[in-house]
Amino acid sequence: MNPHPRILEVRQNILRQNDLVARALRQRFHRAGLRVASLVSSPGAGKTALLEHTLRRLRPRLRVAALVGDLATENDARRLARSGAPVRQIVTGTVCHLEAAMVEQALDHPDGAWDLHQLDLLLIENVGNLVCPSAYDLGEDLRVVLMSVTEGEDKPLKYPTIFNSADAALITKTDLADAVEFDWRCAQRNIEAVRPGMPILQVSSRTGTGLREWTDFLHNRLIAVKQSAEEGLIL
Amino acid sequence: MHELSIAMSIVEMASEEARQHDGGIEAVHLRLGAWCGVAREALQFSWQAACAGTLLDGTRLVIEEVPLTVYCERCRQQQTLAAPRLLCPDCGAPAPTVVGGREMEVFALELAP
């Protein structure tokens, strides 16, 4: 080995390309007055069920749309479209996570680009995966990590990177909590341990418990903030 | 994690730098944080395959691991953590401010003499 190597400093983020696209998307969203939230979780934690209820509840008062990522099938998009909101499926093929470029392509799809100025809130459902999505910025304002009561209280400790990258945690399928003897305090402690101060919500899409608090949370975090900002500007 | 695809992104990035500097590359130096989401071993394993047939064929991959580092507000200093719990190892207070450990960076290229 050469004892005096010539070193060229590069100092570039490996995912720089994604970061650039995400940044541009974020600017585009802001210019259009569109707020964006993404959902991440293990496969089967209940993202789609939650989204279905969320879209139905928000539609009367907000112009809401959704993008959903899966390796295969358009099943989730079809299911979400029943809410009446505009929904598009991103079929990734073999890619285990969504990237900013995929979101961009879906929004500007040849079938008809969405006019972002005509939307208030965009919800993005990531591919079910608690590992890979963590590093990929999608240009969102809020990232919510879901975990179901059936996954165990130590989930956050097993996947600290993605829990730490999120802005809020949502414990789902709470109607099954007793059946699996879910330890709430332990789960909350573990979430707190990897992301101190992160808001933790609970929901059962099946019974409806917690859905109002969830949609209120989305509204307060994303929409109300935007509205005050607009009013502030006007004043 | 999809380390082969990450390795290919690194090859692409390094190849572009190599072209601009008109010389051979001996090694690519990375900094990988403990919480970057990429497994070091899997990346090393994928490296040869990612380089095959490219400008970087035969180069070494040198990985510097960056530990999870937080800033403790109470102790007013940085602390390196081993466990996933964000607690200051000295005073035990929650330490949410992550200042290191998320890096996924091509740090430098080692050029041929």
Image (cartoon, rainbow, N blue to C red):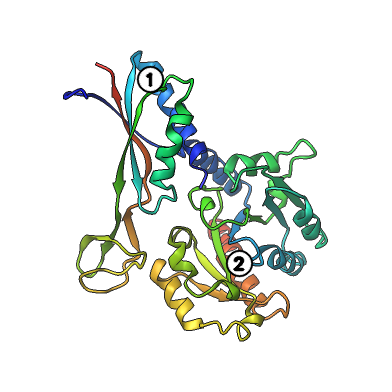
Whether residue A225 is visible to the viewer of this picture, yes or no, is yes
Between circles 2 and 1, the one closer to the viewer is: 1
In this picture, residue B97 sits left or right of residue A221:
left
Q: Is residue A187 above or below residue A13?
A: below
Element type where label 2 sits in the image: helix
Q: Residue extending furthest left?
A: A3
Image x and y of residue A209, in percent: 67, 81
In this picture, residue B109 sits left or right of residue A88:
left
Q: Which residue is mark 1?
A: B18
A157 or B43, which is in the foreground?
Answer: B43
Mark 2 belongs to which amino acid?
Answer: Leu
Looking at the rendering, which quadrant does residue A175 occupy?
bottom right
Residue drawn at (58%, 56%) of the image = A129
Residue drawn at (47%, 63%) of the image = A163
Instruction: Tell me the quadrant of the picture where the C terminus of chain B can be found.
Output: top left
Image x and y of residue B82, in percent: 29, 61
Q: Is residue A4 above or below residue A94?
A: above
Residue drawn at (62%, 76%) of the image = A213
In the rendered structure, the residue with mark 2 lies on which chain? A
Element type where label 1 sits in the image: helix
Looking at the rendering, which quadrant does residue A150 occupy?
bottom right
In this picture, residue B93 sits left or right of residue A213:
left
Mark 1 residue crowding within 10 angstroms, few (<14) / some (14–19) / many (20+): some
Q: Distance of mark 2 from mark 1, alpha carbons?
A: 47 Å
Q: Which residue is mark 2?
A: A218
Residue drawn at (49%, 63%) of the image = A167
